[in-house]
Amino acid sequence: MRDGPGRDPTREEREGGTPEGSPRLSGFERGTEWLRGVGNASDVVLSSRARLARNLAGFPFVCRASRADREQVLEICRDQLVRADLGERTLWVDLRRVSVLERQLLAERHLISKPHAAGKQSTGQGGPDEPRGVAISLPAERLSVMVNEEDHLRIQAVRSGLDLRGAYDEAEHADNEIERGIDYAFSPRFGYLTACPTNVGTGARFSVMLHLPALRMIGEIEKVKHAADDMGLAVRGYYGEGSDTTGDFFQISNQTTLGKSEGVLMHEMEHEIVPRVVEYERHARGVLLGKRRSSTEDEVHRALGTLRSARLIETDEAMQLLGRVRLGVVLGLIGGGEAGEINHLMLLSHPAHLQRTLGREISQADRRLERATLLRSRLSSFG
Amino acid sequence: MLCDQCGEREATIHEVVIRNNQQMERHLCERCAQGAGVSGGPQPPIHEMLSQYVIAKSGRPSSSRPELSCDTCGLEYGEFKKTGLLGCPTCYDSFGERLGPLVEQAHEGGLHHVGKLPKRALEQTRQRGGSAATELVGDIEERAKRRAILQEQLTRAVEAEQFERAARLRDEIRQLGRIDEDDGGGGGGGQR
């Protein structure tokens, strides 16, 4: 993938917006890298993500840029992203020209943020017609680069399990490739300049998605949140910024981006912080399998029972129950399938994925019915 | 003891910060502490902390602090206070004086960028015969400051027996040393 000159990789470029209507994004029926359920500590860590925030020198930041400036930034970035070696193939999506459902599909796969899908800036301005896009590396979808989100460029790479080094190496490679044709806004004192000063410096955010059901079940989850706060880390829910942490999924990320290098930030997360949380959760799982085995067995099988019997189900409830089933599978209390299959079902339970799987758009009420039907059939082998 | 900030209410929150081997103390009442992003309980999210801090600092009489605006994009400091977002790269220079303490607060005392440098800009500056080091990582004085920060972090890492981390910090200090050498011993300093 990172080979020298002379290679002519196949690159796929789609702009959408043909007069016939928006094109269908292909290749999204499969699972995605961050839900594969493999890799280091994958019993607890779903995925690792590295994100770099970058801006173009000589342009206002997105929130202050005129529409003409934003159009120009989009064009410059698009040209460079299509040219750059970001992976086997690069798919470019102009988000103004694809359907709401397809934008939602990208957000559910965490390839773009929810505000980017809606075209909403952090100031609340904007809408679906905002000039913005995303480049995605295919087929693995391990890298995506959002253009004109809060910063001109948000480069993010993801790996299954605990592998921040792997994610960062890929993001950094993309950063170098993009920089071949783009001058970044940089200052000696503040480093890479970003719209929000909380991202300035390295512009690097390292985050891991953790599944911590046992800590919640034994009532220790608040301690973890407080400890993370004390260490200056952000704790968020499954959907990232602004999402609640009421379920069993948590994203933990660094908040400091200035005064520490990428290597140090990454090392702290990967070797000092996350392993401690993983051990804590594993210890809690040990407690569940020991002293509280029968009540744990009851809880995970009740979750499976509900999913295999329900006729109508909302996304949130499905996520909550699938989280408990996942725990049962990982602990060996539920057989008949792998944790990766449960991860995939979590994705398929979301509205856009559900509609894509069915091949048609349906109302919210019908989605509850279809979701329940899908889960019943896909979970028939588990038990 | 009365609050250091308002001088009216009893100070109930006492903050001790040790930086560069110097101990700094702040004694604040609950209200001022909350405004300054210091609290006894769990920390709020960083963006909330930052905006609280911006608002607290900007609460001073406007006569002593005239409204600043950015020369390039025209963003007024008051607008930044509301949104937490800057308008353009030059804002970092235009609001430098006020932004410095905020940024330091948001990054747990981080003052200077440490880490990756934009390669393309380094190469281009070298090709032009300029001092890449000075343009990108600051003059010799700024680089010395950064080296001191790294050196302090290294000492702490060694004391805590965090050897892998110490090795990374050594690499960064070496990287800075190489930049100095490339720059002819830092001779380009102060030309910007």
Image (cartoon, coloured by chain):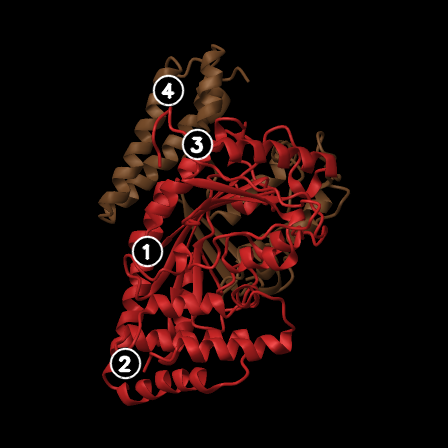
Chain colours: A red, B brown
Whichever of labels 3 and 2 marks the residue nearer the N terminus, that label is 3
Residue drawn where x is 32% and y is 89% of the image: A295
Amino acid type of the residue that numbered disc 1 sits on in the rendered structure: Leu
Q: Tell me the residue that label 2 is attached to.
A: A333
Badge 2 and badge 1 both on one subunit: yes
Q: Tell me the residue that label 4 is attached to.
A: B180
Front tag of 3 and 2: 2
Amino acid type of the residue that numbered disc 4 sits on in the rendered structure: Asp
Coordinates of residue A51 in the picture (x, y in percent): 46, 46
Q: In which quarter of the image is the C terminus of chain A?
A: bottom left
Q: Tell me the residue that label 3 is attached to.
A: A176
Front tag of 1 and 4: 1
Coordinates of residue B148 in the picture (x, y in percent): 37, 33
Q: Tell me the residue that label 1 is attached to.
A: A162
Question: The numbered mark 2 sits on a residue in which chain?
Answer: A
Q: What element carries label 4?
A: helix
The alpha-carbon separation of the residues under discs 3 and 4 comes to 23 Å
The alpha-carbon separation of the residues under discs 3 and 2 comes to 46 Å
Amino acid type of the residue that numbered disc 3 sits on in the rendered structure: Asn
B87 over A47 or under it: above or below: above
Q: How crowded is mark 2: few (under 14 residues within 10 Å), some or many (20 or more)?
A: some
Towards the viewer: A231 or B21? A231
Q: Is residue A156 visible?
A: no
Q: What element carries label 2?
A: loop
Front tag of 2 and 1: 2
Q: How crowded is mark 3: few (under 14 residues within 10 Å), some or many (20 or more)?
A: some
> Residue A287, located in which quarter of the rendered image?
bottom left
Whichever of labels 2 and 1 marks the residue nearer the N terminus, that label is 1
> Viewed as shown, does residue A53 lie left or right of A116?
left
Towards the viewer: A6 or A136? A6
